[in-house]
Amino acid sequence: MSLDLANINTLEIRSTQHELYSNFTHLYEQSFPIFEQRTQAQQEFAFTQEQYHLQCYKDSGEKPLGLPSG
């Protein structure tokens, strides 16, 4: 699979209501041990902080490519 970097879109997830939040939680739960994960309450609190967001990278077909936190 080749990746066209010129057609990568960046989105910011700033609440648990964002359409991609469930994608994030699925990836997050599989990527980190339980003792390193935020609880739902901790994640909701983090979103109340102005500087906190999750960043999502999507290809031109709108398929999620990655979800690092920022």
Image (spheres, helix red, strand yellow):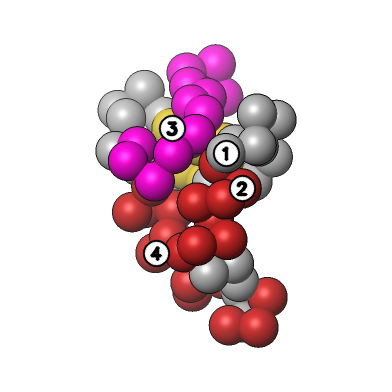
Question: Picture coordinates of residue 45 (x, y %)?
Answer: 57, 50
Specify the amino acid type for callout 4.
Answer: His
Q: Can you tell which of label 4 and label 2 is closer to the viewer?
A: 2
Q: Which residue is mark 2?
A: 46
Regarding residue 26, the answer to whether it shows in the image is yes
Asked if marks 1 and 2 touch (Cβ < 8 Å), the reply is yes
Tag in front: 2 or 3: 2
Q: CA distance from mark 3 to mark 4?
A: 16 Å
Residue displayed at 36% across by 53% down: 23
Which residue is under mark 3? 58
Amino acid, disc 3: Lys
User: Which of the labelled discs sits on residue 26, or is there none?
Assistant: 4
Report, in whole angstroms, how far the alpha carbon at label 1 lies from the one at label 3.
Answer: 24 Å
Does dot 2 land on a helix, a strand or a loop? helix
Q: Camera-side residue: 24 or 35?
A: 35
1 vs 4, front mark: 1
Task: Please identify the quadrant where the N terminus is shown.
Answer: top left
At horizontal 54% and vertical 56% (from top left) the residue drawn is 43
On screen, 68 above or below 2? below
Residue at image position (60%, 71%) is 37
Can you see residue 4?
no
- The range drawn in magenta is 2-18
- Mark 1 = which residue? 48
Whichever of labels 1 and 4 marks the residue nearer the N terminus, that label is 4
* Mark earlier in primary sequence (4, 2): 4
Tell me if residue 21 comes above or below residue 34 in the rendering: above
